[in-house]
Image: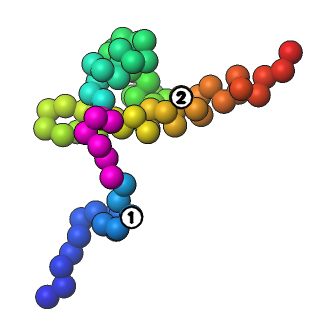
Amino acid sequence: MASTSHSSVPAAAAPSIDRKQLLDKARLSTSMGVSVRLLDDLVSKGSFPRGVRVGRRLYWTSQVVDAWRQRTFSHQLHWRP
């Protein structure tokens, strides 16, 4: 009988996540300098990636947050007076 996997990413291609790179909602909002409520609003509007639920908490990887910052502020890097 063939085994079935519920993951859409092959095991060999799955990224390795270091626990130190995981941010819960409180740490994420603090690092971004915004309130938890504003973070919730950004997520609900689709302006910020959804977290991954582990138990009762949501987590984001620092890589996802860095990519969001890069994309959000990229227009400033190319601004010329």
- What are the residue bounds of the magenta stretch? 16-22
Q: Position of residue 67 (x, y in %)?
A: 52, 37
Q: Which mark is residue 13?
A: 1
| Other residues around mark 2 within 10 Å, as few (<14) / some (14–19) / many (≥20) | few
Instruction: Indicate the position of residue 33 as horizontal and vertical percent values.
Output: 42, 12
Q: Identify the mark at residue 28; answer none if there is no mark.
A: none
Q: Is residue 14 visible?
A: yes
Give the CA distance from mark 2 to mark 1.
24 Å
Quarter of the image with the C terminus is top right
Instruction: Identify the residue at image location x=44%, y=24%.
Output: 42
Q: Name the outermost residue toward the bottom.
A: 1
Vertical comparison of 29 with 16: above or below: above
Provide residue 30's location: percent of width, then percent of height: 35, 14
Q: Quadrant of residue 77?
A: top right
24 with respect to 66 (left or right): left
Name the amino acid, label 1.
Ala
Give residue 37's quadrant in the image.
top left
Q: Position of residue 55 (x, y in %)?
A: 13, 38
> Between residues 71 and 43, which one lies in front from this camera angle?
71
Q: Secondary structure at mark 1?
A: helix
Which residue lies at the image location 40% right of the left edge and 29% below the top edge?
A: 43
**Mark 2: which amino acid?**
Arg
Q: 24 or 50, which lies in front?
A: 24
Give the residue at the far right of this rendering: 81
Instruction: Give the residue displayed 19% in from the left and 85% down from the top.
Output: 2
The disc label shown at residue 69, or none: 2
Number of callouts? 2
Could you tell which of marks 2 and 1 lies nearer the N-terminus? 1
Position of 49 with respect to 81 (left or right) is left
Indicate the quadrant containing the N terminus: top left, top right, bottom left or bottom right: bottom left
